[in-house]
Image (cartoon, coloured by chain):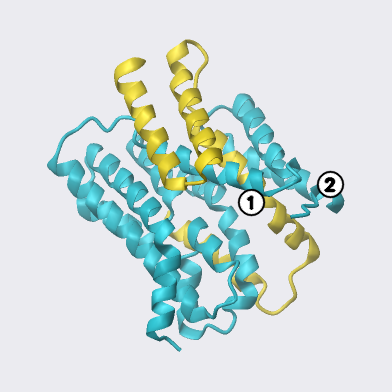
Amino acid sequence: MKNKATIFEAFKNTLPVTAGYIILGIGFGVIMSANGWSILYSVAMSVFIYAGSMQYAAIGLFTGGASFLTVALTTLAVNARHLFYGISMLGKYKSAGIKKTYLIFALTDETYSLVCSTDKGTDYCFLVSVFDHIYWITGTFLGALLGSAVSFNSKGIDFALTALFVTVFVDQWLKSKNHFSAVTGVLCTAAMLVLFGAESFLIPSMLAITVILLAVPERRLNNDR
Amino acid sequence: MAAVTAAIRFLPFVLFSKAKTPAWITKLGSSLPFAVMGMLVVYCLKGVSFENISGFLPELISVIVVAVSYIWKKNTLVSIILGTLLYMVLVQFVFV
């Protein structure tokens, strides 16, 4: 049951995400503004899509006039990892009833990292999901507002996303003994980038990674953490 | 975009609501996150070019700063802000 303690606990645990989401949200809002998109549009994207890395990629895709198919395939490639978040939450979210729809919708990297390692019930997970979503929307709104009010050179601000992924990558690396999977990811993608070029290397990369990870015997991937 | 993202997130719940998760899915599920992170880092750096020094040096320096600061302080926020500010300064004023 939802009570003050659960709400407070959820809020407390999402604080690290707060800062990250607000900053990244602001970055996203600012770039959208700089590209001429309205505040309403930016916020709507954060409400309905709610996928940071994809929203950043979207700016490039839409402004460059990419085709429907390209957008769909790129979204599939960039967000495919969310499939696996869903898989690991299958058991826990089974009994969530009406909240289940939102819980599944809101499975982002950060929310997933908070809910996958806890024993607390679905009310907690729901609150975590909501808080994270709110931070993201707030950041976007602030950024879009800022971008349209003040004109400052925001060139390079999207590096924030690269920085985020680098920290997660380093964090994962430090926490594991077996780096086979991480190295596979980097090498496959780099190779596909060279082979297929920057526009179309994501799908081949995902395919290559999946094939290699499935083909390799379990013990090669074994992570004694 | 919203539809595809939502569809991806819902898919496992639709597919695997009745049956037990197959072993190969579990194996993939536990190893994929590491590979995907590596993929995403390369993806973010896809615009890098080695034709002249300003095409990759800002990225290289900033990525190293992010990684080293994170190893040192384990603070995601500090690393992101530091790296991003550095990168913005580098591309706006140094390697113009």
Q: Which label is found at residue A220?
A: 2
Protein chain holding label 2: A
Along the viewing direction, whichever of A194 and B78 lies nearer the viewer = B78
Rendered cyan, the chain in question is: A
What amino acid is found at the position of numbered circle 1 in the picture? Pro
* Pointers 2 and 1 within a single chain: no
Rendered view: A197 above or below A38? above
Along the viewing direction, whichever of A191 and A116 lies nearer the viewer = A116
Rendered view: B4 above or below A2? above
Q: x and y percent of residue A19 in the render?
A: 36, 53
Using the numbered discs, state the Cα–Cα distance from disc 2 to disc 1 in whole angstroms. Answer: 16 Å
Does residue A44 appear left or right of residue A2 in this picture?
left
Helix or strand or loop: what does disc 2 sit on? helix
What amino acid is found at the position of numbered circle 2 in the picture? Arg
Q: x and y percent of residue A219 in the render?
A: 86, 51
Rendered yellow, the chain in question is: B
Does residue A183 appear left or right of residue A202 in this picture?
right
Task: Please name the residue that numbered disc 1 is placed on.
Answer: B33
Q: Residue at x 67, y 72 (%)?
A: B16
Q: Is residue A50 visible?
A: no
Q: x and y percent of residue A155 in the render?
A: 30, 30
